[in-house]
Amino acid sequence: MADKKIYDTVIIGAGPAGLSAAIYAGRATMDTLVIEANQVGGQVTTTSVVWNYPAVEKIDGTALMNQMQQQAANFGVQIVHDQITDYELEGDLKVLHGRQDYYARSVIIAAGAKPRELNFPGEQQFRGHGIAFCSTCDGELFTGLQVFVIGGGYAAAEEADYLTRYAKHVTVISREAEFTCAPLTAARALNNPKVDVKFNTEIVRVTGKDYLETAVFKNNQTGKEFSYQPDSSEQTFGVFIYIGTQPATAKLTKILNHDEHGYLKADATLATNLPGVFAAGDIVVKPLRQIVTAASDGAVAATSAEHYVTALKQRLQIPIERKQKSATKPVGQTTKLAEKSTAMVHQGSWFDAKLQQQLKSIFERLTQKVTLQVLSDNGQKSQELQSFVKEFCDLDRHLDYQVRTAAGEENFLPLLELLDQQQNATGIRFAGIPTGHELNSLVLAVYNLAGPGQELAPELIERIKALPVTKIKIGVALTCHFCPDVVSTCQHMAAINPNVSAEMLDLQLFPELRQAKHIMSVPATMINDRPVIFGSQTAEQLVAACESATVK
């Protein structure tokens, strides 16, 4: 085992519990690795505003998670993206199986939970076509429409209030007789003039053809049913589901003690039934699942893991060498860039001084030139895109831009296309202005083309290189936290293989595409005109989808 890297602790999950554990473990100079399958930050990144985190009056959910991630990185903790598919947790050496094997003396399970589904008729059929679970991702796609929020807890009250910035009206459907959250949180919905609340009510079914056309509800006291249908001018409506979570314990319930719902049982030190295995956050049996309780769990679990590893090394006569690791670079932390780029649009500047410095520090690693070519229709959005691109290219000598008038060959304008050092098209394109969270996609596209590039597993790179002609379009909302991961992964594939093209499309600018594909959720990935794939996807899933879409 001498050739294997053995960590003091491996943390599964990079939500508030996992990041808090990483901060405490890193500060204790433990050799620590965090493994995250999806979005760093977990469910908090789908939260519009966090109102109840101590000492912070209010903050965007992703911004809060970015700060936690930065703290962990400052203590030298590395985060990798991988999906753990199996666990060997007995014995002194734990083995975690993903794209590669990871070895650890202790493990902290902080994999969190995913939104729970109701399984009413039509829920799966219309997912992405009206059924949604993330207001910050999909809310703007329901601008001017009626929206129903299913649930009666914290998330339902908070997100109902948030959705009123887009929806014509929001109706909360709660099976309980009153909200089950704190009165101040409930008041956000109850006191909003654009929100109605129907208590003792449940959703029965939804129907439609391409979009939601009818929703049927039932009063659970009288049994009386009633239905909703949009008027002809609106065509459809939305149903956002916030009814709690389901723990990510599918591979763990056979080896770790759990309750009837799959949540893991842990003692006061957050130790599970297996020595050296700890659990933290929403995955644990507990009365309250909030960001602050998850962060507390992470601190306790990391401290317990430190004590366990110290005793283990003493027993095995392994030298205890603790030294502070140098800071690492946070992965996927781009929301701060995105927020600033959007905020500056109406002030004559896209990037303030702080943001310019952040971008310049990334572009210092570029070794080749990239040309950002704008295809313009001379409209207002084209003028804005030209302004954005010019200011972006002024940040580094490796960046250049050019503008040409589109000759009617493009369906989606304005369009930004990246050209390589030889002025060849790379297949990396942005239909619309890549601001908001999509600034991240543009930065990574440049980095992957002209810099060291992001790391990918060698076997995955070989599969990407083997792809035949593959055309990918990704419908996004600039407010979506999950879209940039999908866009940047697909565009990374285009940077590796000239047969692959990957185009971001801002769906707010192209309603005709939304209507043609019946899209009401993002990210919406379209590969070679196959059926739309909704939701966040890992690199492995996207490559597999491309392989499937190109099989003859």
Image: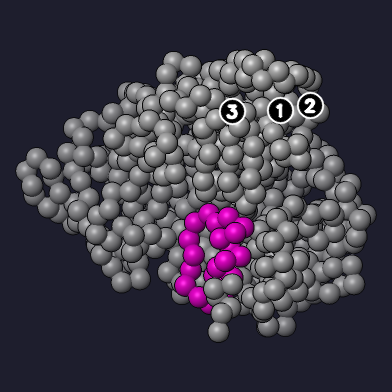
Q: Is residue 321 visible to us here? A: yes
For disc 2, the marked residue is 325
Of circles 1 and 3, the one toward us is: 3
The magenta region covers: 526-546
Q: Earlier in the sequence, mark 1 or mark 3?
A: 1
Q: Marks 3 and 2: in contact by CB < 8 Å?
A: no
Q: Marks 1 and 2: in contact by CB < 8 Å?
A: yes
Q: Earlier in the sequence, mark 2 or mark 3?
A: 3
For the residue carrying disc 1, how many other residues have a C-alpha within 10 Å: few (<14), some (14-19), or many (20+)? many
- Image side of residue 281 versus residue 67, left or right: left
For disc 3, the marked residue is 92
Placement of 445 over or under 428, stated as above or below? above
| Type of amino acid at the residue the image marks with label 1 | Asp
The residue that appears at 30% across and 45% down in the rendered structure is 150
For the residue carrying disc 2, how many other residues have a C-alpha within 10 Å: few (<14), some (14-19), or many (20+)? some
- Image side of residue 396 versus residue 461, left or right: right
The residue that appears at 69% across and 68% down in the rendered structure is 464
The residue that appears at 35% across and 37% down in the rendered structure is 262
In the picture, the disc for residue 31 is: 1
Of circles 2 and 1, the one toward us is: 1
The residue that appears at 70% across and 46% down in the rendered structure is 341
